[in-house]
Amino acid sequence: MAKTLTGIITKIRLKPGEEGKLLQKAQEIVETLDLRGLKKNAIIRGMPFGDLANYSVLSLSGWLIKNFNNIINIDLLDQYDIWAEKMMRERKMGKLLKTRQL
């Protein structure tokens, strides 16, 4: 199945012959995530940062299911924080900044 590492779900490992069950297993896992978990898992799988705020929970879940076995890059979480801070400063929202928005 998948392993959780501080809210981050890693790749789904299937037994031989279960390749057709990937979508079903991804859906089962995604259904257990809250919004914060959905966002974290989408970011590390390469969702464009600008799209993250524009997606509804259903759209975010669908994107994550389709891209569940993408290569995971944990460094994208830090890059997202930098990007989000920059966007907030550009929009004069600096007073709302907190450490680690996710």
Image (tube, rainbow, N blue to C red):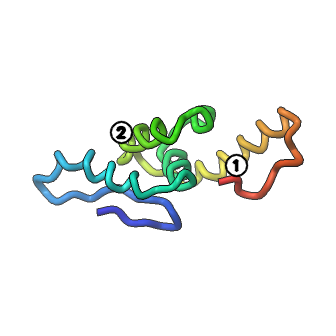
Q: Are marks 2 and 1 in contact (CB under 8 Å)?
A: no
In the displayed structure, does residue 20 sit left or right of residue 78? left
At horizontal 66% and vertical 52% (from top left) the residue drawn is 78
Mark 2 or mark 1: whose residue is earlier in sequence: 2
Secondary element type, mark 1: helix
- For residue 67, above or below residue 102: above
Residue for badge 2: 66
At horizontal 21% and vertical 57% (from top left) the residue drawn is 14
Residue type of the residue flagged with mark 2: Lys
At horizontal 38% and vertical 47% (from top left) the residue drawn is 68
Q: In this orientation, which residue lies closer to the viewer: 45 or 38? A: 38
Q: Quadrant of the N terminus?
A: bottom left
Residue 3 on image: x %, y %: 38, 66
* Crowding near the residue tagged with mark 2, few <14, some 14–19, many ≥20 C-alpha atoms within 10 Å: few
Quadrant of the rendered image containing residue 74: bottom right
Question: Marks 2 and 1, how far apart in space?
Answer: 24 Å
The mark closer to the camera, 2 or 1, is: 2
Mark drawn on residue 101: none
In the displayed structure, does residue 25 sit left or right of residue 83? left
In the displayed structure, does residue 57 sit left or right of residue 28? right
Residue for badge 1: 81
- For residue 86, above or below residue 99: above
Residue 85 on image: x %, y %: 77, 44
Secondary element type, mark 2: helix
Quadrant of the rendered image containing residue 61: top left
Q: In this orientation, which residue lies closer to the viewer: 70 or 62? A: 62
Q: Residue furthest left?
A: 17
Residue 71 on image: x %, y %: 42, 47
Residue 15 on image: x %, y %: 16, 60
Residue type of the residue flagged with mark 1: Asp
Q: Quadrant of the C terminus?
A: bottom right
In the displayed structure, does residue 12 sit left or right of residue 95? left
